[in-house]
Image (cartoon, coloured by chain):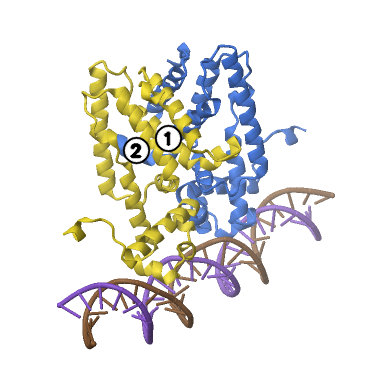
Chain colours: A yellow, B blue, C brown, D purple
DNA sequence: CAAAAACCTGACCAACTGGTCTGGTTTTTG
DNA sequence: CAAAAACCAGACCAGTTGGTCAGGTTTTTG
């Protein structure tokens, strides 16, 4: 019983799969799907190329497995927000979440961005539907906030787009940011950028920034 | 004289070059550099593949020529803003400019984004330097505004990143937006998105939205 | 402890694709 | 109007790359 519940799987297969996924994330983020060479993933994972194809049926299979893992990162605390919650609190936390993902998983973010830019050719309609439903329910909550007078009038779509865009930017465009700042952003700079972004967006829609995010 | 000045060049070569660049922009935006097939560009341009290689030495050459044209889109009215100008006016116009590019040249925006996400492997150090200098001079102007009390204290870098991110998002992530909205954004929706964005950002940094952008 | 399952890997290949070559035709020019 | 320049395009090729195969070894299991 303890075995079936504990997630830790240290079998050879599980370890190698993880190694491969980690290596693939780096490679796909830098070179895109077509530009990525299975051999390079193998080199990075320190395994022979044939093993990559052994664990994942094909390059496509590997990419899809990776993409699925990446999509799970879209879940957040905002998913369960209700009309009775405080918009300032919820939105600030959501922005902080998104920024944290940009900091910790920049390559995952890049792969997602590449996928969307290319017209989302590999995103299943299942994900699209799920995403669409999520959006509709979140838009509904934001509208309720507006009706309740907790939030000034603003188009919920554009608000969400803005949050996604500006937080993901720190991952996707890290090369540009590094170039312009003269160095890579460290953890404390990310903290500042997060504060700055929370202030800009909350103030931008007429909310007061909660003191813990100041 | 009139000949050397007039830009219109309707020679066969000029027409074909233009056809090829237009076709290439679409293909590279959808498939990325590696994923794009010269044959597909040829099909789209309705020319034999060999002609593509005739006009542009190589796939690389074509891509570089296209990229150079795209980079020129980064120029805007903000380039010449001075400390004595009104920040609200200047920033609103800049955001409007950027949104207009996202609407009219989404593929160009995507190619730029792909380039940056992949670590900017093809951006010459000349462009990087130029871009860096531009950034420094714009940051200086924003700092002057803050010193003059025309603009509340805000990190100029994060302000600019936010403008870029949120305006480019409408081009780069158009597939996601179309999916979530249920339809492609038309011109009037772009106008609304622009107003919404201007309000969010200006209000976010404590400025009043000029009446012509309301 | 044997047999089954999982894992490993070098050798190989078929398909694809950027690019060349050659021999044209059309357009421009002096 | 001739010759040079520009343009056109089919045939072809060499390098690359995802993927297969066959024959192993190691680990797990009953």
Q: Which mark is residue A167?
A: 1
Tag nearer the camera, 1 or 2: 1
Pointer 2 chain: B
As drawn, D15 above or below A137:
below
Q: Is disc 2 placed on a helix, strand or loop?
A: helix
Residue at point 52% right, 38% down? A185
Which image quarter is the N terminus of chain B in?
top right
- Give the number of callouts: 2
Q: Is disc 1 placed on a helix, strand or loop?
A: helix
Q: Nearer the viewer, residue A8 or A84?
A: A8
For label 1, the crowd category at 10 Å Cα-Cα, with few meaning under 14, some 14 to 19 and many 20 or more, is many
Q: Nearer the viewer, residue D28 or B144?
A: D28
As drawn, B6 above or below D15:
above
Residue at point 30% right, 38% down? A76
Q: Which mark is residue B178?
A: 2
Do tag 1 and tag 2 residues touch (Cβ < 8 Å)?
no
Pointer 1 chain: A
Residue at point 19% right, 58% down? A2
Q: Is residue B210 left or right of residue B137?
A: left
Which image quarter is the C terminus of chain B in?
top left
Q: Position of residue B161 (x, y in %)?
A: 51, 31
Q: Quadrant of residue B204?
A: top left
Q: Position of residue B181 (x, y in %)?
A: 31, 34
Residue under disc 1 on the same chain as residue under disc 2:
no
Q: Position of residue A86 (x, y in %)?
A: 27, 22
Res B70 visible: yes
Res B9 visible: no
Q: Spatial distance from mark 1 to mark 2, Cα to Cα?
A: 20 Å
Q: Nearer the viewer, residue B55 or A70?
A: A70
Q: Is residue B79 left or right of residue B207?
A: right
Q: Position of residue A129 (x, y in %)?
A: 25, 43
Q: Is residue D25 left or right of residue B1?
A: left
């Amino acid at each position: 019983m303890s075995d079936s519940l504990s997630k830790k799987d240290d079998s050879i297969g599980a370890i190698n799969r993880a190694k491969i996924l980690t290596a693939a994330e780096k490679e796909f983020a830098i070179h895109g799907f077509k530009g990525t060479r299975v051999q390079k993933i193998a080199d990075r994972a320190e395994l022979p190329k044939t093993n990559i194809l052994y664990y994942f049926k094909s390059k496509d299979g590997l990419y899809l497995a990776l993409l699925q893992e990446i999509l799970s990162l879209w879940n957040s605390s905002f998913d369960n927000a209700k009309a009775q919650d405080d918009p300032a609190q919820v939105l600030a936390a959501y922005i902080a979440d998104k920024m944290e993902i940009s900091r910790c998983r920049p390559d995952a973010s890049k792969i997602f961005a590449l996928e969307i830019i290319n017209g989302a050719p590999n995103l299943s309609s299942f994900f699209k539907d799920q995403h669409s439903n999520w959006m509709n329910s979140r838009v509904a909550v934001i509208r309720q906030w507006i009706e309740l007078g907790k939030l000034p009038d603003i188009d919920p779509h554009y608000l969400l787009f803005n949050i996604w865009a500006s937080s993901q930017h720190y991952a996707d465009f890290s090369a540009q940011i590094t170039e312009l700042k003269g160095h890579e952003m460290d953890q404390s700079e990310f903290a500042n950028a997060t504060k700055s972004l929370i202030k800009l967006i909350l103030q931008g829609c007429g909310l007061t920034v909660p003191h813990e995010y100041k």
